Amino acid sequence: MTYQIGKEISPLIPVNKGSAVPEAVYGQVSTFAGSGISGSFTPLDGIGTAASFAKPTSMVLEASGNMYITEDFRIRKITPAGVVSTVAGRDFPGYADGVGTNVRLSYPQGLSIDGAGNKYFADWGNDFIRKISNTDVVSTIAGNGFYGSVNGTALSSNFYQPTATAVDAAGNIYVADPSNNRIRKISVAGEVTNFAGSGLRGSSDGMGTTASFSYPADIAIDGSGNIFVADTYNNKIRKIAPDGMVSTLAGTGSVGSLNGKGSVASFNYPYGLTVDDVGNVYVSDRENHQIRKISPAGEVTTIAGTGLQGKANGIGVSASFYNPRGIVADHQKSIYVADVMNHLIRKIDLLGFTINPALPAGLLFDGKTGTISGTPSILFKPTNYTITAFNENGNSATNFTLSVVIPAEAPIITSITPSSLSPGTTKLSINGTNFLEASGVTIGGVSATSFSIVSPTTIIAAIPVGISSGNITVTNIYGTGTLPGFIVNQPPNISFSGPQTYETGIEIIPLVPTNSGSAIPAVTYGEVTTVAGNGSSGSANGASTTAIFKNPSSTVADAEGNIYVADAGNNLIRKISPDGTVSTFAGSGSASFADGIGKAASFNQPKDLAIDESGNLYVADYSNFKVRKITPAGAVSTLANFYLL
């Protein structure tokens, strides 16, 4: 598929011969539950985001759709309707079996579930493995309450700050015992043994206890009985086959965030993982603040997270997390993440369409429909693309090649900016089409002092010294485009004629200046007026002085006379058009961070603005410690990040 630069394409729509693809956006991150305010001492039950959590660490899903969650000293539950309740525990640590608030826990984590619906978890601070029955009764099934690494019958054995559990199809329970650098096994008969790991820190592959780990923090089991291990301090994902053979599935062992196959990829403290129905392993890459995916073929990709701390919702790598940990996949192609330091449960949709690699600038991909549309704005060599469609039954992919070339047409000039040139103007913007590969620009019959091709539709040219009128031309190999009537407005040239000596007490004939230059506007020099705002604090768009701002801190104007305002108190970028109409140009109004288009983006106290020749705005996003960029079309992106030391 070959397209021409600057020419809108006919939308490219995939043909689906299988079952329907839901209108969802693959990689869409949303907040499933939690207000984001820690509930350590005043946990709030409620619906969805009205509830609060205290550092949620793990979760598991029942067949009914209920989700159980561990947090500091409690077990919480979320129904399919989003109702959050407290199942067990109080707002302080301790140890006691029982029901509801009679139960005492100390940093429970690592939930798993068996075929009968019983839940298991590691009670980290008490060194126990505990069980939640179908009637929400909490009991202790292994450990003697003293830390150690003794095997034996369940309640005579001990663990050392265990962090995770997993249950196989036969009912055996596996325990991540990271401070012992081992994976332990509790048989159906209640016997505790060492399943894998020598007990010494290392990263050796091998059979069972000849292999070594370094703080294996989480485990998950697939349908074939393979156990996957988040080998945290080794920055690797390990695999234990049913026969006990330990191998390395992914990770170089060095800190990083590279995608790639197997040992090419890198992680930074992988701390949680889960396996879906088709064998994909999803990893909470804690210190990278990302969610990674390992395909059955071993290919590692990043499905969500900017790599920086944050709590912004968004699509894929535009969303952000803060030390994600527990993770679980449902049967509807969604995964849920315990976003620990944000005190949130997040949801990532894995339905819809994806494209790889990214399209050239100007072309847009609709993740809900798989449609490609837009106007390409850069040249692009032939590149192979893959579009993949995901629904509840699986996925399907199609491949194609796309390139962007220059149209075989002469330039067309439609206008210049500014449209009225004042004396002293040294540069102008030439607008039109077919400007790429332009070989020459003339202004008033003289070659422009210099020119730069900003896009297929814009050239910035320097006006030659002494040139004040004439035609503008742009030339490429296919011909020349011309715009007549270029003129630089001259300054006024005033003089007086007639008598200038008058007699006292005699009314004079008005002395009117003669102007042989350009017209003088009928305004009073030095007069101060209000451009916009009614003087009260708030947020309202509208005509001129009916609009309301809150602590506006900076303004800039573009070549068309639009004024942009950093409305710091409202977390908005506002626009005042030449006729005085005030509108919101970018920002949701919430004090948060998100890139996006217009009101889909968010700022936190934008304090200063600048604008370039192409009309791009640059924003000092003060409380987000970022410099943001807004294109003339309103697309907000992050240009740079800054941090307090």
Image (cartoon, helix red, strand yellow):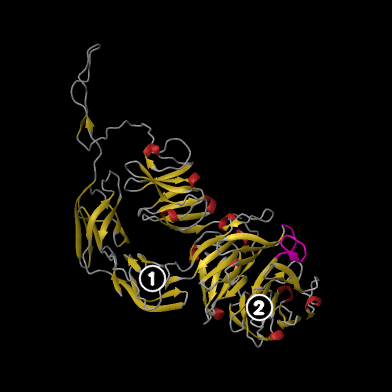
Tell me residue 216's x, y (percent).
67, 75
Question: Going 44% across and 56% down the picture, which residue do you hit?
Answer: 600
* Direction from residue 283 to residue 490 in the image, left or right: left
Residue 160 shows up from this direction: no
Quadrant in the picture for residue 362: bottom left
Tell me residue 217's x, y (percent).
67, 73
Residue 101 in the magenta stretch? The answer is yes
- Which three-letter amino acid code belongs to the residue tagged 1? Gly
Binning the other alpha carbons within 10 Å of mark 2 as few (below 14), some (14 to 19) or many (20 upward) gives many
Of 547 and 172, nearer the camera is 172
The image's mark for residue 511 is none
Tell me residue 543's x, y (percent).
36, 40
Q: Give the magenta part as a residue range.
A: 91-107
- From the viewer's perspective, is the residue at label 1 or at label 2 nearer? 2
The image's mark for residue 370 is 1
Q: Give the residue pinned by disc 2.
A: 167
Question: Going 34% across and 41% down the picture, which residue do you hit?
Answer: 580
* Direction from residue 11 to residue 414 in the image, left or right: left
- SS category of the residue bearing label 1: loop
Residue 24 higher or lower than 275, as above or below: above
- SS category of the residue bearing label 2: strand
